[in-house]
Image (spheres, rainbow, N blue to C red):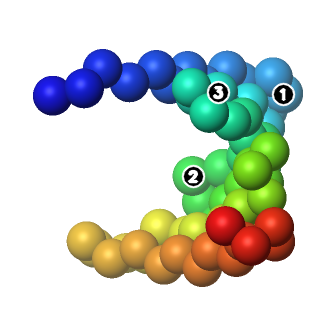
Amino acid sequence: MPLTFRKSFRILPGVRLNINKRSWSITTGGKHGPRHTRSSSGRRTTSMDLPGPFGWRRTRSTKGH
């Protein structure tokens, strides 16, 4: 199993900075309601936890990735 690097920092209430080996991203939003993530690689993700074992996610790549 390969080793991976991933670290997440809370920089403000409701704002997180996520860093991994290839890119970084900013996530806004909290546990209740939608979360929006923008990555340095051009990916944009909107996700939301729904009641029960369900979740919703929509991902868009803006740089052709």
In this orientation, does residue 57 appear?
yes
Q: CA distance from mark 1 to mark 2?
A: 15 Å
- Looking at the picture, which amino acid does disc 2 mark? Lys
Outermost residue toward the left?
1
**Residue highlighted by disc 1:** 12
State if disc 2 and disc 3 touch (CB < 8 Å): no
Secondary element type, mark 1: strand
- Looking at the picture, which amino acid does disc 3 mark? Ile
**Residue highlighted by disc 3:** 19
**Of the image marks 1 and 2, the number of the one nearer the N terminus:** 1
Q: Residue at x 62, y 74 (%)?
A: 59
Q: Residue at x 58, y 69 (%)?
A: 47
Q: Which mark is residue 31?
A: 2
**Of the image marks 3 and 2, the number of the one nearer the N terminus:** 3
Quadrant where the N terminus is found in the figure: top left
For residue 40, what is the image quadrant?
Answer: top right
